[in-house]
Amino acid sequence: MTEQHTSTHMEEPHITPLRTYFKIGMALFLLTFLTIGAHALRQYLQPFSALIAFSIAGVKAYLVMAWFMHLKYDKPTNRLIFASGFVFLAVLLGFCALDIVSRIAQSSIL
Amino acid sequence: MASHYRDATHQYDSNKEGIWLFMTTEILMFGGLFVGYIIFHALYPEMFAEGAKFLDWRLGFINTLVLIFSSLTMALGIYYCQVNQRNKATWALAITILCGAVFMVIKYFEYTHKFHLGIFPGQKLNLEMLKPVHENLGLYFGFYYCMSGLHGIHVLIGMGLITWVMIKNIKGEFNSKYFTPVEGVGIFWHIIDLIWIFLFPLLYLVG
Amino acid sequence: MGQHVTGHVSGKNYINEEPGLLSWFTTLDHKRIAILYFVSVMTFFLIGGIMAILLRLELFAPNTTPNVGQILKNGDVYNQVLTYHGAIMVFMVIIPGIPAILGNFFLPLQLGAKDVAFPRLNLLSWYVFMTGAALAIGTFFSTKIDTGWTFYTPYSIRTGGAVVMMVMAAFIMGMSSILTGLNFIVTVHKLRAPGMSMFRIPLFVWAIYSTAILQVLATPILAITLLLLAMERVFGIGIFDPKLGGDPVLFQHFFWFYSHPAVYIMILPAMGVVSEIITTHAKKTIFGYTAIAFSSIGIALVSFFVWGHHMFVSGQSELAGIVFSFITMLVGVPTAIKMFNWLATLYKGSIQFTAPMLYALGFLFLFAIGGVTGIILAVTAIDVHFHDTYFVVAHFHYVMVGGTLMAIMGGFFHWFPKMFGKMYNELGAQLSWVFIFIGFNVTFFPQFILGAKGMPRRYFDYIPEYEQLNKISTVGSWLITTGFLIGLFTMIQALRNGAKAPDNPWGSKTLEWQTSSPPIMHNFDHEPIVTAGPYEYK
């Protein structure tokens, strides 16, 4: 099932250098250790400990998406497609949370 | 190349777009679980903290490192396809599968230990054995088993898919000009890693 | 819209090209897959329709009436029949309906493409769909479910019956919907013929495209919701069950997050069909192409923000109700824009009162009523009284049957010559329309009044005050049935004895009419080069 390259002006798909992959991998490892460290110190980090944990997770997620999943060098359409999933999840969470919070505020039995 | 495409690039771009659309549906499906989790964690913070105490954060930590490492080897597998180093690609894929297996073995030990303690999801939780402070502790474990269970099923599916492309690679079906299935499987595997990156703190590091 | 690219290759076409039944079940041709869906979906429509007839027969008279009052064994059986009617019609007919049949057949043709982006995935979609359908029908032979198609908790957690099997069936059919939507998005992005910019694609394509976006983004939430319901039944995980501090209303949030966009999955393709029929059969350029195109996308996007209007009396907060009510009003705007644009298209057109045009006009009238009553229901103060009454039942039947089913019938007749190479009998088709249109209004208009008078839905019996209108409604259901049978008969007769259809019997400008009837296997002899928009009639 091999394919022929027929067009002369085909762009070479971007190849991430090996070193970059290792650097990203190392960064992910370090950030995981950081997560554990923050967890161990969580008493001193209140009330920010949850925020810190998820910020670190966010950075890790970005590294995986941008480099391992190659989105940094991919077409904008694919980035938009993938992002839309997160956007609509936020809509689901947002309106459900709105309901539940305002149910509590109006003293409904939950 | 399928006849309704202009050239290889056209087919490749279309395939990639299809792959990303599918991955978006995976994110949405898992995301629903996360939305549920966030809501109930906000409603019952102490109960969730009590539940998390039954989880061994060290095993979760090891599993996180295992999956990150496997993401690296998966990326390497694609890299070696791109530079026509077929044997190294096979090795990279094989190690990725191995990491998946390690993850599942650790998961197996985690689950069986919990079963031993009477920790089952939802109303199957053995309240007499555990005598938890919060009577609805089963809700936390409902989330724990559903989220880690669905994730684990995807790890197994991913291992199967990587095996499939690894075999195709050994047979010489991929080269620097064509390796789309490896990429697709790779993206799927990275999503599994991505989900775990959030599952780990959410389940293990709460409270 | 470019050149005439007939494919007259020794009379071969997609139907006779590969002989034998097996070739149909292993086909990769989008047109054959469309026919596979045609047969299966219409079969399910028949089954769902029989359920409806049973319901209306039961409701013909109050149960105490001798002989005709009660035909079903008891209320539990009634609940089962209404559940299957809803579940079959929603998951197995209206949601797949136009996209899987007409979308599959005509999306590539209208784009000037040879097939969809992923032909093998397309065939897989059908098999996945049939697997889910088999499982759903399987529950019929196991313990039947009685939850209503909406599976509300906590009843769906506690009731007997093969609920897990049915939700798994819906899960599987959802996967089919996702794969189809994915396929169509990539097809529209990547396989348009040279010269066909996004603003030269037919409005049917815009409709299918918007629908596909909904299929991909909304269905996964249904998937996880159904999975969680199954987990509730098996393990009692607690998310929707008050026993463990869970929230039954959350089930409704999750369920309607999909199911509201789902109703736009049902109606958007129908609107696309209407655009095609009106332009062709009035020989007139569409009024406001860009507005209709953008309103399709607009409806798709806004549809994600309104789901709570199904939940005004569920126990959700007042604030949530107000927010959802307000946004629901907004979604009426792009819909109304389309209605005005279609009317403006008809104005000063050369209207042929062919059966397709009759169905399209029927759509305009019936969908207007259905849509407006939706806006009425969006007013929280009104909905508090109308929720779970026949007013709601009438509303959604006006949009789903008066809207989508009218459009699908119109689409079937409009495209029949192209799909099968035969002309249908115009009189038979028009007669089917007369019975369906009149029958539909006789069935459902009284239900608005019944609902306003307070008759609850999903009830096995009713007070004598409601008897007159219920009788009228039941008689209407017999008229609709007659109409569909006439339509079916007309199509079968045409397949057997119809006159040979020319390539372009309607003189339409879209690409599918610039090739043979039926199309050759690869659609076009030569790839079309597009130099104009799709509706350049004058």
Image (tube, grey):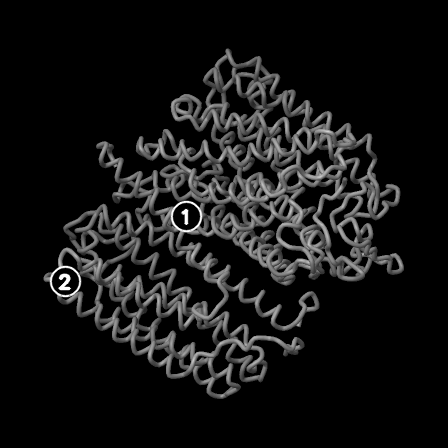
Instruction: Say which of marks 1 and 2 sits in front.
Output: 2
Question: Mark 1 Cα within 10 Å, few/some/many (few <14, many 20+)?
Answer: many
The residue carrying mark 1 is C225
Q: Residue furthest left?
A: A44
Residue C267 in the image: above or below residue C193? above
How far across and down, in percent of the image, does residue B163 sit? Answer: 48, 76
Give residue C122's quadrant in the image.
bottom right
Q: Chain of mark 2?
A: A
Assign the N terminus of chain A to one quadrant of the image: bottom right
Q: Chain of mark 1?
A: C
Q: Amino acid at mark 2?
A: Arg
Q: CA distance from mark 1 to mark 2?
A: 34 Å
How far across and down, in percent of the image, does residue B188 sit? Answer: 45, 67
Assign the C terminus of chain A to one quadrant of the image: top left
The residue carrying mark 2 is A42
Q: In front here: B200 or C282?
A: C282
User: What secondary structure is found at the residue carrying circle 1?
Assistant: helix
Asked if residue C266 lies left or right of residue C250, the reply is right
Asked if residue C443 lies left or right of residue B51, the reply is right
Task: Answer yes or no: are tags 1 and 2 on the same subunit.
Answer: no
Could you say which disc has been placed on residue C494 in the image? none
**Residue at 39% across, 33% down:** C311
Residue B104 in the image: above or below residue C491? below
Q: In front here: C191 or C50?
A: C191
How far across and down, in percent of the image, does residue C205 sit? Answer: 64, 48
**Residue at 41% across, 48% down:** C225
Question: Mark 2 Cα within 10 Å, few/some/many (few <14, many 20+)?
Answer: some
User: What secondary structure is found at the residue carrying circle 2?
Assistant: helix
Asked if residue C10 lies left or right of residue C344, the reply is right
Are the residues tagged 1 and 2 within 8 Å (C-beta)? no
Q: Amino acid at mark 1?
A: Thr
How far across and down, in percent of the image, does residue A88 sit? Answer: 41, 50
